[in-house]
Amino acid sequence: MTDGTRVLTDALIEARVGSAVADEVAVAIDRRRLLEAGSLAGVRAEVARLRLLVQAQAGEIADLRQRLADAEAAGHELPVEDLLRAVAGSVAAGAATLDGYAVSHARVEVRTSLAVSSAGLRVRSSDPALADSASLGTVAMEVGALPPTPGQEAVARAVADLVSAAAVLQAALDRDFPAIARDAGRSALARASVLAATPVSAARGAVPVTAPLVELVTSLQALAGPLPALAGPVAALAARQRALPATVTDPAAVEGVTSALRDLAAAVDRLPR
């Protein structure tokens, strides 16, 4: 191989090597461009997806806010007359638990937000400290019990007499009975004690003795089984008890039960000891 040929061969080899390197560089550059283009497209797609998600969530949040506002408006507003009714009911319920006492009147002041609409004046159960001072108002009321009517007073007196008669029967039943009637006698004594302890102050217009009277009659009927002398008075009391309604406007119905209780107490006293 001559020197000229060697030079040409070396030049050709160098050219081929340079071409291969150039091709590899070009491929690498093209690959990088493709990767960058694909990555950019992926980023753009992710951004578009996130934007759609944010828009959907913003719509849901707006809907929830509206529903919350509607619920607060519907659930935390009530007409003033409902407020007055609730206060009066609470006072009456509290007064009924005070045995031997009476609530002459109660004064209530409510500082609250007021709303005026075509439906009338309404109060809002919100924190006054957070409300607009221009919308705040005070609802003040005084609640007092009406005096009982003459009919209610008559029923109350009749119930007091009935409870007194139950105490008389209680004393009569506090005795020794024959062995065959001993358990029934103890049960009747316990029921008579409950009726005798009924608070009379709660007996205006209604009779709070109905339930204990029914239980007393049931126990007395068990007692009359082994003691025939009590069968007649117990039957008379049971008939009076069945005729007694839960709410009484005529004191005569209560007076009939009272008379039957006293007759039964006398019959028990006549039993041999």
Image: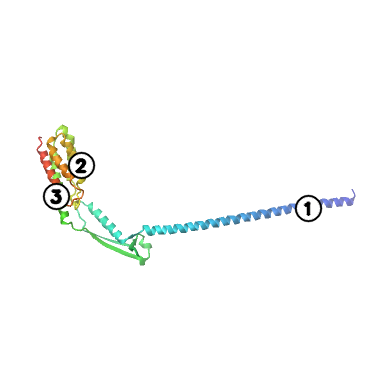
Write down the quadrant of residue 30 in the picture.
bottom right
Residue 252's disc number: 3
**Label drawn at residue 215:** 2
Kindly state the secondary structure of the residue where label 1 is placed: helix
Depth order, front residue of 11/265 = 265
Q: Which of marks 3 and 1 is nearer the N terminus?
A: 1
Residue at point 33%, 61% (across, down): 123
Tell me the kind of residue under disc 3.
Ala
Residue 19 disc label = 1
Circle 1 packing at 10 Å, graded few (<14), some (14-19), many (20+), is few
Residue 160 visible somewhere in the drawing: no
Residue 44 is left or right of residue 127, and the answer is right
Disc 2 residue type (three-letter):
Glu
Q: What residue type is labelled 1?
A: Ser
Image location of residue 231, percent across then percent down: 14, 37
Question: How far separated are the C-alphas under marks 3 and 1?
Answer: 128 Å
Identified at 18% across, 36% down, the residue is 222
Between disc 2 and disc 1, whose residue precedes?
1
